Amino acid sequence: MWKESFELGIIASSLPFIFYRLGWSWLMGFSILVLMFLIYFYRYAEFLGRFGDNVIISPACGEITDIIELDGYCLVSIFLSPFDRHTQVYPINGKVIKSVYDQNGQFKLAITRNKSHDNEKKMHYILANNGAVVKVTQIAGFLPRRITSENKVNVKAGEYLGMIKFGSRVDLMFPMKVGDTEFKRRVIVGNKLNIGDIIGLYRKID
């Protein structure tokens, strides 16, 4: 919490002590509950697993709400509730070729794909080691007002990417075919994912 939102961490940690000194016990109790929720929400554990170049993993914890295969591409949408871990990782081995922050100020409900098209977001384009260009989009939802991410070039699947604050969505888009390989999906709509779960992998076309 102090790494991602230092000011919020200091304020949330100080309020219980301040209210205690003022004798406002009910506010002290409420501020302790808020602090406990923030610590839970900002929880982070480094993901140590690593994968081969043809594997795409889940960049986030959450539920798959959409899978769309169209014009040779696949879009997987993962919704993060306030109770999911809100850190994200890179989904594939490769090189970040571009990152774009779309700061338009709209914060609609992120669970609905069509309604959240104009939400504030950050898009990361990764040239994977197998030749695929994979797009990861961090989308701010109704409550969050901030997206953070690391500035890396060479990345590995499972390395820390960033965080979205308080309920959001992560979209993953990638080509269905790369060279002599095609993507074999291992997930369906409704699946509950953890960071590092395998979305699918590229295999040689029979």
Image (cartoon, rainbow, N blue to C red):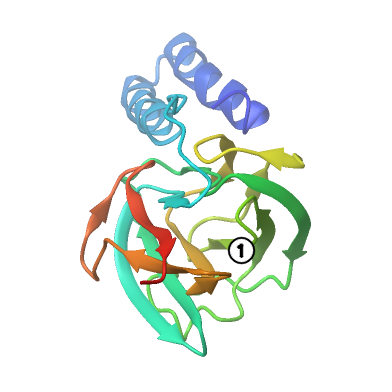
Q: Nearer the viewer, residue 114 or 19?
A: 114
- Identify the image quadrant of the N terminus: top right
Quick check: can you spot residue 43?
yes
Q: Nearer the viewer, residue 81 or 32?
A: 81
Residue under the image location 45 percent in, 44 percent down: 86
Three-letter amino acid code at the position of disc 1: Ala
- Identify the image quadrant of the C terminus: bottom left
In this rendering, position of residue 122 left or right of residue 110: right
Examine the image and state in which quarter residue 203 appears. Answer: bottom left
Residue 85 locus on image (x, y percent): 38, 40
Q: Secondary structure at mark 1?
A: loop
The residue at which mark 1 appears reads as: 132
Q: Nearer the viewer, residue 132 or 35?
A: 132
* Mark 1 Cα-neighbour bin, 10 Å: few <14, some 14–19, many ≥20: some
Above or below for 10 versus 193:
above
Residue 60 locus on image (x, y percent): 42, 48
Residue under the image location 40 percent in, 28 percent down: 31
Quick check: can you spot residue 109?
no
Above or below for 167 versus 66:
above
Q: Residue furthest bottom?
A: 71
Q: Nearer the viewer, residue 88 or 176?
A: 176
Number of numbered callouts drawn: 1
Above or below for 68 versus 134:
below
Residue 99 locus on image (x, y percent): 76, 58
Examine the image and state in which quarter residue 105 appears. Answer: bottom right
Residue under the image location 60 percent in, 31 percent down: 8
In this rendering, position of residue 55 left or right of residue 11: left
